[in-house]
Amino acid sequence: MAEEQIGCPKFQAQESVVARLTQQINAARTVTEKAPKTEELIKAVEELLDCGEYKEENLDCQLCHNFSELRKKTAELILKAGRLAR
């Protein structure tokens, strides 16, 4: 079965950035080490959430926004965990 992809050049470009940052966050051992990359990840997904070409009726746009919102919430939880650990 072929893997489906979101057919948006902006998403595809950001996806490589998001994947790299996610890998770096996962590889970091402490929340303190994760924080800088997590902040970068939030900025990367915010670029997608602020897309000027967003069309609510477009399934690719909906998926992009849903994935980006989930990634942002996850990243915010990592940062919150870091603040609680202090």
Image (spheres, rainbow, N blue to C red):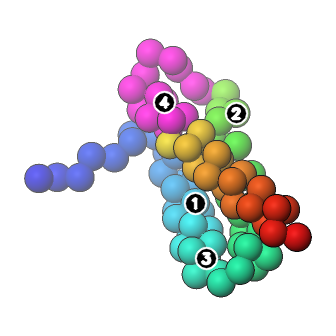
Mark drawn on residue 24: 3
Give the mark nearest the N terminus, 1 or 2.
1
Label 4 to label 2: alpha-carbon separation = 11 Å
Q: Which residue is mark 2?
A: 50
Residue 39 in sight: no
Tell me the CA gap for discs 4 and 3.
26 Å
Is 37 rendered above or below residue 70? below
Name the N-terminal-most of marks 2 and 3: 3
Looking at the rendered structure, the secondary structure element under dot 1 is helix
| Marks 3/1: CA–CA distance | 10 Å
> Closer to the observer: label 3 or label 1?
3
In percent of width and height, residue 47 lies at: 69, 43
User: Could you say which is closer to the camera, residue 2 or residue 42?
Assistant: 42
User: Residue at the location (61% across, 52% down)?
Assistant: 74
Amino acid type assigned to the residue bearing label 1 in the image: Val
Q: Nearer the viewer, mark 2 or mark 3?
A: 3
Whole-percent x, y for residue 21 in the image: 62, 68
Q: Residues within 10 Å of mark 2 (few under 14, many from 20)?
A: few
